[in-house]
Amino acid sequence: MSSLTSPLSDVQSTPPVHDAGDLIITPDDAVVWDAVKNNQLEVLKELIHVKANIDAMNEGKTLLEEALSHPDLAVVRLLLDAKADTRSCFTRLIHFSNGDALKALIVSNADVNIVVGCRNYSPLHYAVLEGESAATVLMLLEARADLEIRNIFGDTALATAVVTCEPETVKLLIDANASIEAVNDKRETMLMMAARVRGFEMFKLMFDQNPNIDLEMRDSAGNSVLCHAADAGHVEVMSFLLSAKASIDVRNNEGQSPLWLAARSGVVDAVQVLVDTGASLAGTCDNNGNTLICAASQAKGKHEAMLRYLLSANASVHETNHFGQGPLFLEIERHSRVTGAIQCLIAAGAQVNKPDKDGNTPVMVAARMAHVDVLEELIKAKANVNALNNNKESPLLLATKYSIWPGLREEATQLLLDAKADVDMRVFYDKTVLSCVV
């Protein structure tokens, strides 16, 4: 047999080979691909012997995938025996729902418990995440996929199925004896995860697995199941838990009660169901002094209705947390555009010039963050564009020198100048705004 250690230049000048005995070139990716594509088992053995790259990819496709396209699995087994990397192959076959190739890979004794990617997903995790059919999940289970492998967050495949709201997959995994008592790295139980999922079906499915579960269990952040449901604004789950006598008086590590979390969810009915059960709207705040109306101002979604509900229940737009920040201040920190909530608070009499403990007013927040639409709304509401904070910074200085969005800096600056912001006023170090900027 000829030598297999010829220079790489020979590879480039020698045509593709079709017989191991004629092989006189140094293997490169193209030669390996040719051997696999043409199902040349003996050629591939020689290439592997000289340590060919058996993980070579071509147009995003792995050698294993190419090998799996042949009815004869001998090449697949050879690649697996040579320790070909199956991770990308598993993920691609699952992603593209290539059940036949996946079955062939499993039949060839590929390790179905290999972890994939930086998040340590097993093929079973990945199948659940991709919302694959029951057939794919069953195929992996029949191949003895480990049900208790944890991803980087400590979630098992069952936890992943619960969070992604796949009831049929959850049933399959439970029938396969997946642990319903497993908790993740945050000490969240399956029931806590289910309480966050939209719809009641998943929660009821998990509850029915253990009707005697302790509803007052806490995760590492101190949240009970009711806290999770309230934070997600899941009224039906909350009603169920309250009828099961879950405590409405619990507080998590940040001092947030189910009522406080429900207010932050922005779902009025979530607050109302707690009030109907005896929760009081008065005097509820977290460890930082954020009251219910401050909590509502931190909601991610639409929450104007929540603010109006709380205001109708005598909440004050002048309430502030321990940092002196009121609901208007908190709204502006989180929203770059004028929202119904901001307009609602201004119309209700929120003080547009009220500073926090650092002396920053709402207009300063809007200027520094270059929230142009909000800045214009505050100016219309008679915000003081020449106020100074404790560091002797004015809105104009914050907009021109410290704005975190340079692309909108010019527009914000022009708005303030049109509102008579003083370029010659003395700021820190007794400098003028103009001299600080130039």
Image (cartoon, grey):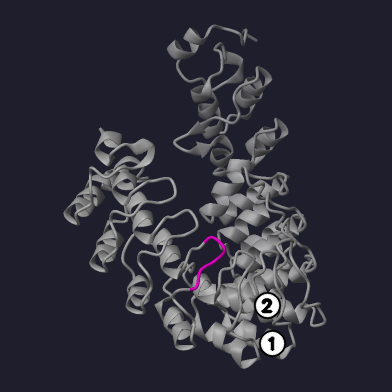
Does 321 lie within the magenta span? yes
Q: What is the chief secondary structure element of the magenta stretch?
A: loop
Q: Amino acid at mark 2?
A: Leu
Residue at 65%, 23% in the rendered image: 48
Q: Position of residue 195 (x, y in %)?
A: 64, 74
Q: Residue furthest left?
A: 418
Q: Circle 2 sits on which residue?
A: 226
**In the rendered image of this protein, does residue 424 appear above or below residue 419?**
above
Q: Magenta span covers which residues?
A: 319-323
Q: Is residue 72 visible?
A: no
Discs 2, 1 touching: Cβ within 8 Å: yes
Between 297 and 137, the residue placed more toward the observer is 297
The quadrant of the picture occupied by the C terminus is: top left
Image position, residue 41 (x, y; %): 63, 29
Quickly name the residue at label 1.
242
Q: Is residue 359 left or right of residue 133?
A: left
Q: What crowding class fits label 1: few (fewer than 14 Cα within 10 Å), some (14-19), or many (20 or more)?
A: some
| Residue for point 58% across, 42% down | 88
Residue 253 lies in quadrant: bottom right
x and y percentages locating residue 148 in the rendered image: 77, 57
Task: Tell me the kind of residue under disc 1.
Answer: Leu
Going 33% across and 49% down the picture, which residue do you hit? 394
